């Protein structure tokens, strides 16, 4: 295996990832946007180390019927949808199923938007350097949707940052992001969770607590 690292948990992964991003520490106009839920503990450590504000950018995978972890697409805040038509055809997923699953995930995205943002608007990203953080990259569908969603807000630069990812996915995303930082690119790569000792689910309560802690650290107020 090449450049393989197993992280204790998402907090440990965030600390390691922050070291790979240290050139952004203290720089003006930098904001960390974590992809809930698993990306938030990682993003919390990155934002703390860089002295940058932390917020979330909502995305949802569109999983194959019966194989929900196998994403054939993703949606993001702002009405963005990314579909892998080749995978959809390979899995023989009907157009009706694509629309049904998309509608279901759109409802969940709206629920999480209300829970995590509490009615607050997304921070102004125009002219900012946005660092998009998740706990890893497998197919990259969620991150691809996030990049396209964030681009609608006219940031100066979009940086994708993950502790671990498939080399092919990290390379492919360089065509869409201004920079991609994958701290560890083990080969072979089968799933994100195999590179964590503790990959237990991050809950809504965990996300909300970390966002409150980040806001308090930055002297901001969250509802």
Image (cartoon, rainbow, N blue to C red):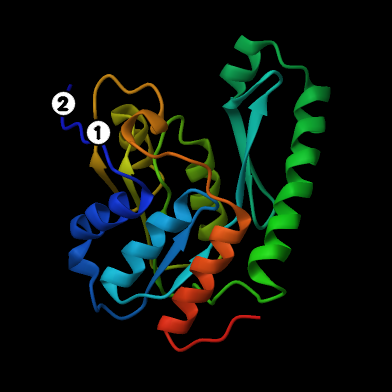
Circle 1: element type = loop
- Residue 131 appears anywhere in the view: no
Q: Quadrant of the N terminus?
A: top left
Circle 2: element type = loop
Between 43 and 95, the one lying in front of the other is: 43
- Residue 4 appears anywhere in the view: yes
Q: How many marks?
A: 2
Residue at which label 1 appears: 185
Q: Residue at x 72, y 16 (%)?
A: 93
Q: Position of residue 138 (x, y in %)?
A: 42, 31
In the image, farthest residue toward the bottom:
219
Q: Residue at x 16, y 32 (%)?
A: 3
Closer to the N terminus: mark 1 or mark 2? Answer: 2
Q: Quadrant of the C terminus?
A: bottom right
Q: Are marks 1 and 2 in contact (CB under 8 Å)?
A: yes
Between 146 and 165, the one lying in front of the other is: 165
Residue at which label 2 appears: 2
Residue neighbourhood size for the residue with mark 1, other residues' Cα within 10 Å, grouped as few (<14), some (14–19), many (≥20) = many
């Amino acid at each position: 295996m090449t450049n393989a690292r197993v992280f204790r948990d998402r907090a440990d992964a965030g600390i390691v990832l922050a070291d790979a991003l240290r050139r952004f520490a203290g720089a003006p106009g930098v904001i960390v946007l974590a992809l809930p839920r698993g990306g938030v503990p990682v993003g919390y450590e990155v934002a703390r180390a860089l002295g940058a504000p932390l917020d979330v950018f909502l995305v949802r995978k569109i999983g194959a019927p019966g194989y929900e972890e196998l994403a054939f697409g993703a949606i993001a805040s702002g009405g963005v949808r990314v579909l892998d038509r080749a995978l959809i055809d390979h899995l023989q997923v009907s157009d009706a199923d694509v629309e049904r699953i998309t509608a279901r995930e759109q409802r969940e995205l709206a629920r999480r938007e209300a829970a995590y943002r509490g009615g607050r608007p997304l921070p102004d990203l125009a002219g900012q350097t946005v660092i998009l953080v998740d706990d890893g990259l497998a197919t990259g569908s969620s991150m691809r949707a996030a990049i396209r969603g964030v681009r609608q807000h006219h940031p100066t630069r979009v940086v994708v940052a993950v502790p671990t990812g498939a080399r092919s996915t990290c390379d492919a995303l360089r065509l869409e992001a201004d920079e991609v930082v994958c701290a560890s690119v083990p080969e072979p790569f089968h799933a994100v969770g195999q590179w964590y000792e503790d990959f237990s689910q991050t809950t809504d309560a965990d996300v909300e607590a970390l966002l409150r802690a980040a806001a308090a650290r930055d002297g901001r107020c969250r509802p």
